[in-house]
Amino acid sequence: MTAYLGGSAFQTIIDNPITAYRQLVQQYAKDLAGKPVDPKIAAEEAKSIFRAQPINASLSGLGPRLIGVGFKRVPKFGILLGISFFIGEDGEVGTTAAFGASILSAPFINPIRMIEKQQRAFFKQTGKEKAIMEILKESAAANFKPLFRGTIPLMGHSMASALLGLVGQPKIQKYIQKELGSRTTLGNFASLVIASAVVSPIYVVVTNPLSRLEVIMQTNKISGNSISVGQAIKEVIHDSKTFGLRGIFRGQGIGVAKAIISLTMFHQGRIMLQDSFRSYNERNNLIPAEFK
C-alpha cells in the first residue's frame, strides 16, 4: 500500500501541469456565452493562460491532488488489494478486483476531483485559482451535494484506469522484458516506458470521452444548476456534430502524453519503493520463512 501511495504522489507532482492544461483545453470547448469553440482556438486559450501565469497554472489543483493521494488512493488501492487478496489472486491484481475498486471507491474520489477542477475552472475570468475553502463553503450551502457531480462517468473512468493501468500495463511490461530482455540491453525503466506507450493510446481513447463528461459536469458554478449525465452527453454529441472527431476527442493528443508520463512515473515510483522495502526486509531478516 505504501509503495502504491508513494508512486501516486510521485506521479501527481510530475504530471500536474499536463493535467491542468488538458482540463483547460476540454473546458474551453464553450466560450463564456455558451457557444461551441473550435478545438484549435480552445487550445490557444489554454496556452494563453499558461503563458500569462505559468507557475500558477502549472501548480493549480496540485494541493487537492496531493491530499487526494490519501483520500482517493487509500480507498481505491485498499479495496483493490483487499478484493485481490480475498479472491486469491496471489498478489496479481485482476479484472474482478479492478471492477470492484472502481465502483466502491468512486464516492471517496469524486469530491477531490471536483475540488481540483473547480480550482482551475475560473482562470479565464479571475486570473487565479479558486480557494479550497471557498469551494467548500459554496458546497456546504447545498449540503455538499455538488461535490458528487460527475460520479457516474468517474466510475467508468476509474475502471478503465484500473484495468489498463494497474492490470494491463504491468503484464505488458513483463512480456516486453521477457521477449526483448534476452535479446537487447533493455532495462527496467525502458521497458516501463514502452509498456506505458503501448497502453496509453488505448487508455486515452477509452477515457477521453468520459473525461469530457467529468469536465462538463464539474466546472460549472457550484451555485448554479448541476449538469446531468444526459445533458453532458448531449453537449459532447453536439460538439462532435459541429467539429467532427476533433470535437469529441478534445485533449486527445495531450492526453496520450499525460498517460505515458503518469503511468511511467507511477509504476517507476511504486517499483522503486517496493524494491527498497524488500531489500530492507531481506537485510534485516524480516521476511517469514514461508514467503522466502
Image (cartoon, rainbow, N blue to C red):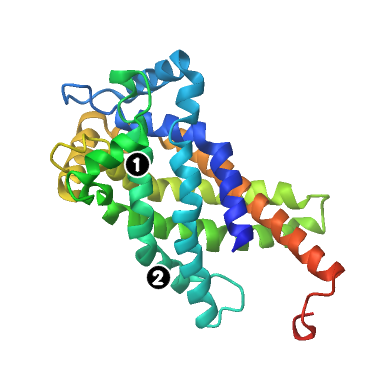
- How many circles with numbers are drawn on the protein? 2
Location of residue 176 in the rendering, given as x and y in whole percent from the top left corner: 69, 57
Q: Is residue 291 above or below residue 153?
A: below
Q: Nearer the viewer, mark 1 or mark 2?
A: 1
Residue 211 is tagged as none
Spatial CA span between label 1 and label 2 = 24 Å
- Residue at the outermost left position: 225
> Helix or strand or loop: what does disc 1 sit on?
helix
Q: Quadrant of residue 218?
A: top left
Residue 137: image x %, image y %? Answer: 26, 40
Sequence order check: which comes first, mark 1 or mark 2?
2
> Observer-nearest residue: 33 or 129?
129
Name the kind of residue labelled 2 in the image. Answer: Gly
The quadrant of the image that shows the N terminus is: bottom right
**In which quadrant of the rendered image does the C terminus lie?**
bottom right
Question: Which quadrant of the view contains residue 152?
Answer: bottom left
Res. 106 visible in picture: yes
The residue that mark 1 highlights is 115
Q: Residue furthest bottom?
A: 290
x and y, in percent, of residue 124 in the image:
31, 20
For residue 100, the mark is 2
Residue 272 appears left or right of 95: right
Amino acid at pointer 1: Ile
Q: Residue furthest top?
A: 52
In the picture provided, is 216 more to the left or to the right than 171? left
- Give above or below for 86 relative to 111: below
Asked if disc 1 and disc 2 are in contact, CB closer than 8 Å, the reply is no
Question: Would you place residue 30 above or below residue 44 in this image?
Answer: below
Query: 190 left or right of 48?
Result: right
Q: Residue furthest right?
A: 283
